[in-house]
Image (cartoon, helix red, strand yellow):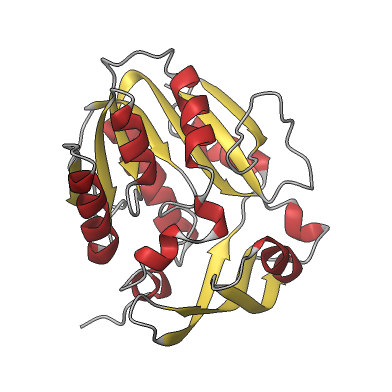
Amino acid sequence: MAKKQWYESLFENYAEKYDNESFTQGTTGECDFIENELNFDKTLHILDVGCGTGRHDIELTKRGYKLTGIDLSESQLARAKAKAASAGLNIDFRQHDARNLPYEAEFDIVLMLCEGGFPLMETDEMNFEILQNVTTALKSPGKFIFTTLNGLFPLYHSVEQFCASESDKGNATYRSNTFNLMTFRDHNITELEDDSGNLRSLDCNERYYVPSEITWLLKSLGYRKIEIFGAKLGAFSRNDKLTTEDFEMLVIAEK
């Protein structure tokens, strides 16, 4: 059996604690922005890739939208289903690998927020497979809204210091960060306490992308309009020009 990748191990038994992480607290504001991008059209069918514990799916379903949420992690999906059930919501949550989706031109909108799959994969080719599968799942015309790590940030800042400054007590911590200028990957040791109280340490690496790379990747997949902005937690806005101060970027691509 193949060795589990760090992103598979990370999300095992880490659903309740995940919901308390500082980076998951911006759901309402992010959904306000998404609604605006959808022109408040509740007939649109939305796919959420890397839906995690379903926070955006639940909020948007409450607002009257139809969502399908997919994730690789069984424990994250179990938490998402439990939260949806307790809120009396019927949401289609499914376990899928974003590199191998069964959908073809089925969705008007695809969301992929808070590093949902992309850019966690161990090779650039695998990350690209996620973009390819999303593009295949999207109707034409269709809109793809996602956030990803901004490769301009680590050139000017310490990722380790940034993560420490954004973290609350009890959140996962990230140390021994090394940013590789040849691959634009940040290697770090992530330490967390899982939902059973076990302390875990994982050797992780994530790919940071510069805007021109994202633009080229999406152009090569046939998107006709690609816009990139700074991604502020809980306050996405088209008014935020991407800078070296932004840890994440917000990408809006149209087929």
**Residue plotted at (39% across, 40% down):** 56
Locate residue 17, reporting x and y percent: 42, 67
Foreground: 167 or 241?
167
- Image quadrant holding the N terminus, namely bottom left
**Residue plotted at (33% across, 25% down):** 63
Q: Is residue 66 left or right of residue 22?
A: left
Q: Is residue 22 left or right of residue 12?
A: right
Q: Is residue 11 left or right of residue 84?
A: right
Locate residue 129, reporting x and y percent: 37, 50
Vertical order, 98 against 48 (above or below): below
Q: Is residue 46 visible?
A: yes
Locate residue 93, reporting x and y percent: 20, 46
Identify the image quadrant of residue 177: bottom right
* Most distant residue in the right direction: 156
Q: Is residue 160 left or right of residue 149?
A: right
- Image quadrant holding the C terminus, namely top left
**Residue plotted at (48% across, 20% down):** 37
Q: Is residue 180 visible?
A: no
Locate residue 130, reporting x and y percent: 37, 48
> Number of callouts in the render?
0
